[in-house]
Image: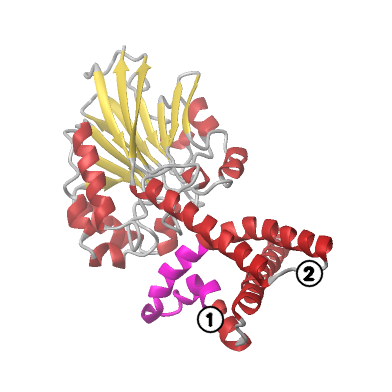
Amino acid sequence: MKKLRGIIQFGLTFILLNGLLLFVGWNGWEWLKNSFGFCYLFVYWFIYGIVAYSFLLGRLSKYLSFLRTVGNIWFGFFQYAVLLLPIADIIILLLKWGTGHVSTTAILIAGLAIIFSIALLFGIGIYNAYSPVIRKYEITVPKKNSKLSTLRIAMASDMHFGRLSGVAHLKKLIKNIQGIQPDIILLPGDIIDDELEPFIQKNMGEMMGELTASLGVYGVLGNHEYYGRQIPQFIQQMNQIHIKILMDEVLTIDESFHLLGRKDKTDKDRKSFEELLTEIDRSLPIIAMDHQPSEIKQARENGVDVLFSGHTHRGQMAPNHLITRKMFELDWGYLHKDQLHAFVSSGYGFWGPPMRLASRSEILQIDICFT
């Protein structure tokens, strides 16, 4: 029954997606035909089909990998075309209903207005994506058994380093984190964007090795590391630059606090918070990384003091943030509940189009006072 439900959901999603693709494609054809007299129907739909399915086509062969970049940009255009085109269509229909005729000039202007609006959104979104901010928090953890009286953490999630989140963006990350001067650096998942090859080709691993802190650099897997299916090779890359990826592990750092790192929720065999925290000294502070913020309640119930997550991107492009807000107890920001301080980052990089609207690329600076 569950399998049948999944097939039905996939089928409905497939029909809806392709229906929207046809809607956007039809609008483009009508605009070109009426505004410029373009009449090459086959040529138009052939080119449109390649662009519309470029992300999938780019996965068929390494020689077509450039189409993945086209597909990433297309995602952004497609989303806002779906949102804006109905407005233009309604205006055109009202003009036709009121006057009985719509001039080619009106159609041309409507199309240009859509293109200008999407271009403006891209401009704002690209700036938000490539201009990260540092968000600072100060919290108190009431545990006295730590050798440390304070701890400064730099945290960055969802870098998605690869094709579009590349060398220049990585250099900004290193510079900003060095400016924070953290005691420890945490990277809770989606460090790379599926494929490991662009990360290696751009020598980004060696550059990431410049991330240093007195208590070390630690990370966990995100869902995109699983999608890439190169986890052993990825972990090897991280080991070479002294970034420890925690795979359902708990470490005691400097005899001062416990650091827990979970496998991503994608891994059905991962251990629960309860299993991981059964045999530890709970008098020490417990800091945890869990890529997806789907088990905040379980973290609180099992005594976690500070929890770091990412994954949501805060929807990345408005109005998607309204969806992530409904999906998670905390989809972005900070939540203090009982002993738990939970942080969910909108991420440092991006997935798909290199743009952010209603979100911003960010690094978190957390200053903890132990009392």
For numbered disc 1, what is the local secondary structure? helix
Disc 1: which residue: 47
Q: Quadrant of residue 48?
A: bottom right
Q: Secondary structure at mark 2?
A: loop
- Mark 2 and mark 1 lie on one chain; the one further toward the N terminus is 1
Which is closer to the viewer, label 2 or label 1?
2
Q: Amino acid at mark 1?
A: Ile
Asked whether the viewer can see residue 158, the reply is no
Q: Residue 349's x, y, as percent?
A: 37, 50
Judged left or right of residue 91, residue 69 is left
Relative to 272, is 198 above or below?
below
Label 2 – label 1 distance at C-alpha: 31 Å
- Disc 1 packing (10 Å; few <14; some 14–19; many ≥20): few
- Residue type at mark 2 is His
Circle 2 residue: 101
Q: Residues within 10 Å of mark 2 (few under 14, many from 20)?
A: few
Tell whether position 65 is magenta.
yes
Residue 101 visible (yes or no): yes
x 26%, y 51%: residue: 170
**Quarter of the image with the C terminus in it:** top left
Does the segment drawn in magenta span residue 136?
A: no
Residue drawn at x 36%, y 17% as measured from the top left:
141
Residue, x 55% and y 46% (percent of image)?
318
Q: Which of the two residues, 211 or 338, is positioned nearer the viewer here?
A: 211
Q: Is residue 90 above or below residue 46?
A: above
Note whether 301 is above or below 262 in the view shown.
Answer: above
Give x and y (percent) for residue 21: 63, 69
Q: Which mark is residue 156?
A: none
Q: Main secondary structure of the magenta part?
A: helix
Residue 189, horizontal then vertical, whole percent:
38, 47
Task: State which region is magenta.
Answer: 50-75
Task: Name the spot of residue 31 as percent of width and height, x first.
Answer: 63, 72
